[in-house]
Amino acid sequence: MRNKTLLIATLVLGLLALAALRLGREEAKPTTAKQPLVEAALLSSLQSFIVKANGKTVTVTKDADGSWTVKEKFGLPADSEARLTPLVRSLQKALTHGQLTANPKRLEKLGLADSSITLNAPGKSVTIEFGKQTDDGLGSSARYQGQPHAIRTDFTGDLDGDPASWVDLTLCAAKAEEVKTLAFGWADGKKEFSRPAKGQPFAGAGAESIESLAASLATLRVGEAVAKDGKDIAGAFAKSFQVTLGFFDGNSLTLTFGQVGGKAAGDAPKTFVRAKHSDPKHKANGYAAKAEFTVPSWIMEQVPTSAAAFAKQNQPAASPAAIPSLAVPAVK
């Protein structure tokens, strides 16, 4: 009898374990398959996108010729290397990793209203809001606009809404050794330097400082783009001077500099530059037609603003004063 009871008890326990196993399987939630955050077709046919972040908004648009420009900055070219390409690649790689939360209180803490990107393609537009990083460090929390829940993503791209940071501010990208001549035209005089041959240094008195200046101006990256009718523009170029770079390929780049005084006594003057290239198709000419540009202070530290300033910068170092000899009395 005892054995029969044990057998029945064992069978009952077995049935209960099997039922629990089946119940557990039925209640287990299926694993959410990873999906692209943005469809590849949308990215491949992208015509424009809008980034909102840090309280600012930038609109980047693809022109008919395939180039990308920044709407809020006079339609100037976008910086593909530093901004456009990294962001698109981040979106191409990003995946969703399932739902994060639909709790309104948790959604509010994620900060999803702080940053977003709207991707526009023919016949389709998608807006994705991005919030804080997920607790496991996977990537940014996100939400498709209009959805009630947030999702986990592995997106780690940089969203910057400042239009100024999206502009390619390199007006010219030549190498210093390509510069054959460098000529100054000031109100109080002129000065010109030239290389005897390609690969050789500039010749002439004061030429030592010209090498670094040629490098800075041949690869000219300006500071900020401002409106052509800005309040300081007319005054800045009322008195101007020029620096012309002549290249070994026969082209030239003429830079016209203008300055206005600082807002307060002792402030450094604000400098603007206009660039004109001898090749009508050069990018510098397209930039000049759309905006005016400031010059970073580190460049202006190298540029003499007058013939007098150049002469002062290149004064020969004063010889050290001779030390008078002292007569030493003879020892008897």
Image (tube, rainbow, N blue to C red):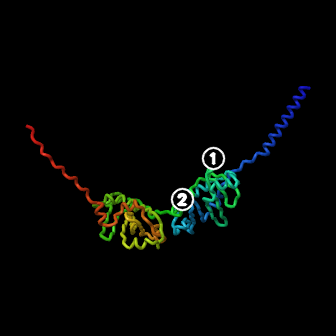
| Quarter occupied by residue 6 | top right
Residue tagged 2? 83
Question: For the residue carrying disc 1, how many other residues have a C-alpha within 10 Å: few (<14), some (14-19), or many (20+)?
Answer: few
In the rendered image, residue 287, in percent from the top left (x then y), is placed at 47, 68
Q: How far apart are marks 1 and 2 (CA)?
A: 27 Å
Q: Nearer the viewer, mark 1 or mark 2?
A: 1
In-image side of 171 versus 104 (left or right): left
230 relative to 150 in the view: left or right = left
Left or right: residue 45 versus residue 285 is right
How many marks the image carries: the answer is 2
x%, y% of residue 196?
A: 31, 61
Check disc 2 and report its element: helix, strand or loop.
helix
Residue at the image point whose x is 84% and y is 34% from the top: 13
Dot 2, how many residues are within 10 Å of its Cα: few (below 14), some (14-19), or many (20+)? some
Pinpoint residue 1: horizontal percent, then vertical percent: 92, 26
- Across and down, in percent, residue 184 comes to 33, 67
Question: Given the image, on which type of amino acid does mark 1 rest?
Answer: Asp
Give the residue number, with chain letter if any, for mark 1.
136
